Image (tube, rainbow, N blue to C red):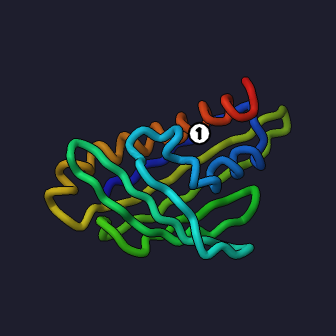
Amino acid sequence: MPRRSVSVQVPFSAQQMFDLVVDMDRYPEFIPWLVKSKKFELTEKDFKSEMTFAFKGLRETFFTRDEIDPPHRVSITHLSGPFSHLDSEWRFTDLPSGGSKVEFFIDFKFSKKLVDLAMGPVFGKASYSMVESFRKRAEQIYGS
């Protein structure tokens, strides 16, 4: 299973970064391979999400349960879709000098061999660019 982790410091607060990550309905505006994203069944502690990605003629939709601990953590667990396994987590920590530390962890495996061969390496690389996409989005929303 591909496992990835990324950690960066950004000049935005943990709350600001948390807010961007839970604003899933806006993902297609700034994540290129994501064509649909929405959240539903919201509670104070979690929500469910639906995401559809498209790449090289493949289009897959998956559903997750996202547990939240504002503004510190979002833990994501696979419910259904093309993965046999998907767990990921966002962590946000305010820094004493200003800004925050953003950490992203993902562990996944596609259930279909064809999808795994075509999308596995791409999805793994996209995991690294996710944090960068959110940093750029923060600059657009909050200023640089």
Where is residue 78 drawn, in percent x and y? Answer: 43, 70
Where is residue 89 drawn, in percent x and y? Answer: 55, 58
The residue carrying mark 1 is 134
Residue at image location 29% in from the left, 65% down from the top: 82
Where is residue 117 drawn, in percent x and y? Answer: 17, 51
Note whether 1 is above or below 129 in the view shown: below
Q: Nearer the viewer, residue 71 or 142?
A: 142
Note whether 83 is above or below 140 in the view shown: below
Q: Quadrant of the C terminus?
A: top right
- Give the quarter of the image for residue 17: top right
Q: Nearer the viewer, residue 97 or 119?
A: 119
- Check disc 1: other Cα within 10 Å, few if <14, some if 14-19, many if 20+: some
Q: Nearer the viewer, residue 114 or 8?
A: 114
Amino acid at pointer 1: Phe
Residue at image location 67% in from the left, 66% down from the top: 68
Q: Quadrant of the N terminus?
A: bottom left
Secondary structure under badge 1?
helix
Residue at image location 77% in from the left, 49% down from the top: 15
